[in-house]
């Protein structure tokens, strides 16, 4: 199976970490620039987005679907899927945070003049961070190797990199919970520096 991705996409990073956690998947990495609409990507994903996963029997788009497929296909299931309404809430909020942060970055690239959508993205990001802070304080989350927590960790890393001002609103308690999370070794392996080398496989 072939994963189409690029080095700066948080959605791609999420998929790569999920693949790394399932260990022995026969996966190769194909590096593309989605904004240039390469034919190879469009043949696999009509949406023109990465990550996209090409299989012998078809293709999967959307990072969460790809992560869940890796869990199903891999021999080791190290990421649990949500088991409670609280976990589904966290998954939705974390994925939405990633989407809105990315939307702001993409808008700033293609439409540098600030407009309503830029502001809506920033406002949504800020409110999501406030909610995450509150939820953590009401009942600190245990460190778990779950999909929702992986999405949260990748989303907060992306926020820190691309929207540092918004990331400063994250409480020190939540920041240290992230730093001590058991998924950190896998995340640190799939670092931005490692992704920039565009390896052909996940080591
Ligand atoms: N909801 C999608 C978002 C994927 C996405 O927005 N990918 C970006 C790169 S980070 C992309 O391919 N953008 C090109 C486009 O939207 O045309 C997911 O979770 O996989």
Image: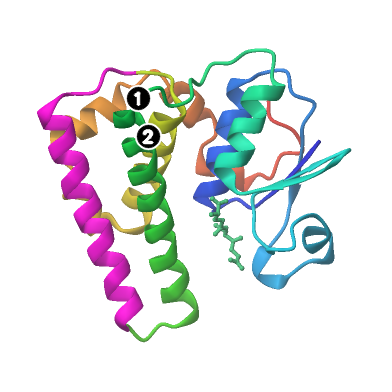
> Pointer 1 and pointer 2: residues touching (CB < 8 Å)?
yes
Q: Secondary structure at mark 2?
A: helix
Of the 4 image quadrants, the one containing the C terminus is top right
Residue 191: x %, y % from top left? 51, 37
Q: Which residue is mark 2?
A: 88
Q: Is residue 168 magenta?
A: no
The local crowd at label 1, few if under 14, some if 14 to 19, many if 20 or more residues have their Cα within 10 Å, is few
52 shown above or below 34: above
Q: Which residue is mark 1?
A: 84
Q: Quadrant of residue 28?
A: top right
- Indicate left or right for 24 with 170 as reference: right
- Indicate left or right for 61 with 104 as reference: right
Residue 171 visible, this angle: no
Of the 4 image quadrants, the one containing the N terminus is top right
Residue shown at the point (43%, 65%) measured from the top left = 103
Residue 187: x %, y % from top left? 47, 30
Q: Quadrant of residue 184?
A: top left
156 shown above or below 67: below
The local crowd at label 2, few if under 14, some if 14 to 19, many if 20 or more residues have their Cα within 10 Å, is some
């Amino acid at each position: 199976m072939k994963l189409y991705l690029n080095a700066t996409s948080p959605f791609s990073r999420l998929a790569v970490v999920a693949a790394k956690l399932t260990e022995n998947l026969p996966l190769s990495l194909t590096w593309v620039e989605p904004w240039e609409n390469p034919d190879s990507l469009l043949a696999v994903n009509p949406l023109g987005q990465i990550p996209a996963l090409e299989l012998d029997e078809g293709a999967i788009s959307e990072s969460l679907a790809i992560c869940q497929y890796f869990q199903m296909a891999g021999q080791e299931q190290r990421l649990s899927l949500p088991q409670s309404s609280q976990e589904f809430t966290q998954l939705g909020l974390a994925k939405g945070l990633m989407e809105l942060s990315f939307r702001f970055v993409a808008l700033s690239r293609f439409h540098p003049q600030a407009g309503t959508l830029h502001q809506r993205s920033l406002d949504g990001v800020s409110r999501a961070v406030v909610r995450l802070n509150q939820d953590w304080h009401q009942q600190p989350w245990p460190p778990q190797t779950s999909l929702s927590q992986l999405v949260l960790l990748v989303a907060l890393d992306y926020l820190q990199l691309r929207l540092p001002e918004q990331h400063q609103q994250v409480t020190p308690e939540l920041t240290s919970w992230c730093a001590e999370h058991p998924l950190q070794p896998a995340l640190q392996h799939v670092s931005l520096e490692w992704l920039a080398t565009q390896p052909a496989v996940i080591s």
